[in-house]
Amino acid sequence: MIISTRELPEECHSLLDRWGLKDRNVEEYLKEGEALLAWPSQVKDYVGKMPKLKVIQTFSAGVDDLPFQLIPAHVEVFSNAGAYSTSVAEHAWALALALAKNVNVRRREDTVLLHGGTALVLGGGGIGSEIARIAKHAFDMYVIGVSRSFRRPELFSERRGLQDLKELMGRADVIFDALPLNKETVGLLNYDLLSRTKERVILVNVGRAETVVEEDVIRIMKERKGFKFGTDVFWRKGGKENFDSPLWGMENFAGTPHTAGATASGEVLKRALVRACENLRDYLSEGHAENRVRKEDYE
């Protein structure tokens, strides 16, 4: 039996009803549930009530909110990485272009020509790959990718690892952060790395806020007006993402309150839900699926 923490589109029922999908009044079915479809923050309320649980499929791409300490070792976990790639990549480029062209700046100032420049893309998953595709094919850019693995390696002119960041930061005209948040990436972009960038550079974060040190990015933005920062993700204060940031008052900033993915688009959300259902279907019918989560990266 499959338990979903939210009602699902009809397409999901077509995919999963053969395994007994329940997405309404699920409390009475929890003891029989072997699979769980949920947002990461909801898992803690269900995992202890499902003694037969074998697999968790998240609706979200990121899984840093999962309570890994509560999930039994035998339970497989799959993320929904890639489900929001198109929407988030479009959004990343919207922020980059707004900063490059001084959108919403009343006085005339020098703009940045991105065409033919160098893009540094942190994260080689679905979002990073789509950002790279746009950089390569729309802007004829040289694209350097930094990741442990690459979903579409052919889109990157160079493929490197996190250990090479000190060398790479100074080569980019625009840097896109599409990294997941885990033990390796938390606080990764600190003052030391940020200060190695070109005098004029654009940094856009559509991954997780905590991969960037908030105080350090604000410091360098104050020191260098040519350092421009755009973000759709904000740092957590008291357990919740806090959009009340001093960044909003800075001229070299552009931001949105975490609307790049499904939050502001019912169409994007529906597609993401169906994709999660398809991935779970693959696991239940074939024994394997995409986006298996490496628990050791988070524990």
Image (cartoon, helix red, strand yellow):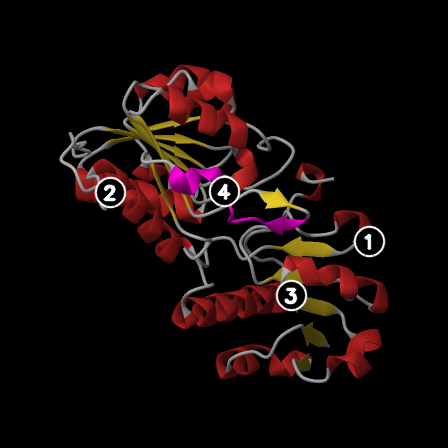
Query: Could you tell me how far apart the alpha carbons at marks 1 and 4 are, in whole angstroms?
Result: 37 Å
Crowd band around label 2 with a 10 angstrom C-alpha radius: few (<14), some (14–19), many (20+):
some
At horizontal 31% and vertical 25% (from top left) the residue drawn is: 225
Q: Which one is nearer the viewer's eye here, 92 or 126? A: 92
Task: Please identify the quarter of the rendering in which residue 98 is found.
Answer: top left
* CA neighbours of label 3 inside 10 A, class few (<14), some (14 to 19), many (20+): many
**First to last magenta residue range:** 239-249
**Image check: 254 left or right of 68?**
left
User: Which residue is labeled 2 in the image?
Assistant: 97
Q: Residue at x 34, y 21 (%)?
A: 224
Residue 241 in the magenta stretch? The answer is yes
Q: Picture coordinates of residue 157 (x, y %)?
A: 29, 30
Secondary structure under tag 2 reads helix
Front in this rendered view, residue 36 or 192: 192
Any mark on residue 245, and which?
4
> Cα distance, mark 2 to mark 1?
45 Å
The mark found on residue 38 in the picture is 3
Q: Nearer the viewer, residue 198 or 21?
A: 198
Residue density around tag 4, few if under 14, some if 14–19, many if 20 or more, within 10 Å = few
Q: Earlier in the sequence, mark 2 or mark 1?
A: 1
Q: Where residue 259 appears, x then y in whole percent?
A: 43, 57
Q: Percent position (x, y) of residue 245?
A: 49, 42
Using the numbered discs, state the Cα–Cα distance from disc 4 to disc 2 in whole angstroms: 22 Å
Residue 33 coordinates in the image, percent (x, y): 77, 73
